[in-house]
Amino acid sequence: MTPTRVDSATIRQTVLDVLRRIAPEVSPDSLQPAKPLRNQVDLDSMDWLNFIVALHERFGVDIPEADYAKLVTLDDVTDYLTTKL
Amino acid sequence: MIEFKLPSLGAEMDEGTLVEWKIKPGDTVHKGDVVAVVDTSKSAIDVEIWQDGMVLELLLELHQTVPVGTVIARLLEPGETPEHADAEKRRIAEAAAAKPPAAPAPSAPTPTKVVPATGSEGRRRVSPAARVHAQTLGIDLARVTGTGPQGAVTIEDVERAAAQKPSADDRALAMRTAIGAAMARSKREIPHYYLATDIPLERATRWLAKRNQGRAVTERALMAAVFLKSVALALRKFPELNGYYRDGGFVAGSGTHLGVAISLRQGGLIAPAIRDVGSLSLDELMKRLTDLVARARALTLKSSEMTDATITVTNLGDQGVEVVHGVIYPPQVALVGFGKMSVRPWVRDGNVMAEPVVTASLSADHRASDGHRGALFLNELNRLLQEPEPLDEAPK
């Protein structure tokens, strides 16, 4: 099933909310969604784990550690969650 | 009677400002209870008490700033009565001041009122309205200039002070000053030596990935926790790296209490301790680490966490660099650094392989140990990380 644009936009907004909670200094407007997230936001391994935990809690999606490599950009994260939901 | 003093809050943190009392006269406290929250240049800190007792009086007002070591509360020891304490207090007062003894204590002393502390300049004159206003605005009255009669602090004075209230920038500056002072002391006093070694992590990474596989996201461990555990276990054979240099000599630590360097998003750094890391299972350690990082970032740490560390571990992580040349946090005698874990060429069994490798470094105090022992420590760390399975369990 192809997700609707609205779905993706809502998911992206929630992802950004989660990210802001971990890295409050981030301004969502300046994030380039197709560029690697961790080149743009200072996230250490604990921040990253907290990010994954928060996504899991918000979306109820299980994100195995083996899938972390697929989650490079903000677009990747949104697409990943969209297909899992 | 227990005279409870403001405990040390970490190197070069000499004073604290009361943010909140967690106790009131008449309360029973137990060893380890948080009794107050004080603000320092680095963080708000939960101050713990290490004795059982009953609170008699509180000697510090909200927003008052006092040096470390100041008596901030009096408590009765278990079994002691207020009369005992009063007698003792009178004795202390008589000994301290060459003044006539105070009026006899009331026959039934009711330790219910908060006694404001008097500084060297005595009790400030503050209008009641100004006091309430200051409390609401979170203003430290000790730092307000009074312009009322006899220098009394008026409501206008409080408002003027509120307009100049320390901003986040001031906090950042204060933290920079505290870090600078501690590190300057370290570089001035501690004859550092530095060692580093590359540690292949092929086995440890595979083991951890397998361990995390199928686990709920909240049950997964980070390599950072594996590093902490291996440092704590390696230290068991190298006690001269774990402890303090005090009063001209080395004092071994009572356990492997690892200070974990945590960088704060707003800038600055804090290194609170996780106690007895060597005796924790990896799951328990991971829980403590997650909690500690969250509280450090929220600036809610405990006083013991600020002073208990017997060594510091800094992990510049996967966004970092290859090698850390750390500066020891006095009075500790060593710091272990981990650089970025990266895939590098590594020769194994005569073949060049692409393997994850981390550079572990040691900065240590030559007054407490020598490079030879430091090198053996790093080799022991390497050995433990080549057989990671035992790191999972709490040692028997």
Image: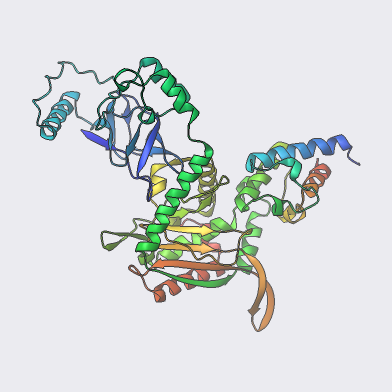
Colour basis = rainbow
| Side of B70 relative to B106 (left or right) | right
- Left or right side of B199 for B79: left
The residue at the point 68 percent across, 51 percent down is: B214
Q: Position of residue B265 (x, y in %)?
A: 58, 46
Q: Image height check: is B285 above or below B197?
A: above
Identify the residue at the far right of this view: A1
Q: Is residue B311 visible?
A: yes
Query: Which of these two is toward me, B223 or B25?
Result: B25
Q: As rendered, which of B169 and B230 lies closer to the eye?
A: B169
Q: Position of residue B356 (x, y in %)?
A: 65, 68
* Quadrant in which the N terminus of chain B appears: top left
Question: Is residue B229 shown left or right of residue A74?
Answer: left
Number of labels in the image equals 0
Q: Is residue B272 visible?
A: no
Residue extending furthest toward the bottom: B350
Instruction: State the image coordinates of residue B233 (x, y, percent, origin top left).
Output: 45, 62
Q: Residue B367 sits in which quadrant?
A: bottom left
Residue B157, image x, y percentages: 41, 23
**Residue toward you, B3 or B81:** B3
* In the image, residue B355 above or below residue B130: below
Vertical placement of residue B261 versus B38, above or below: below
Write down the quadrant of residue B154 in the picture. top left
Instruction: Please state, as top left, top right, bottom left or bottom right, where the C terminus of chain B lies in the image.
Output: bottom left
Front one among B120 and B262: B120
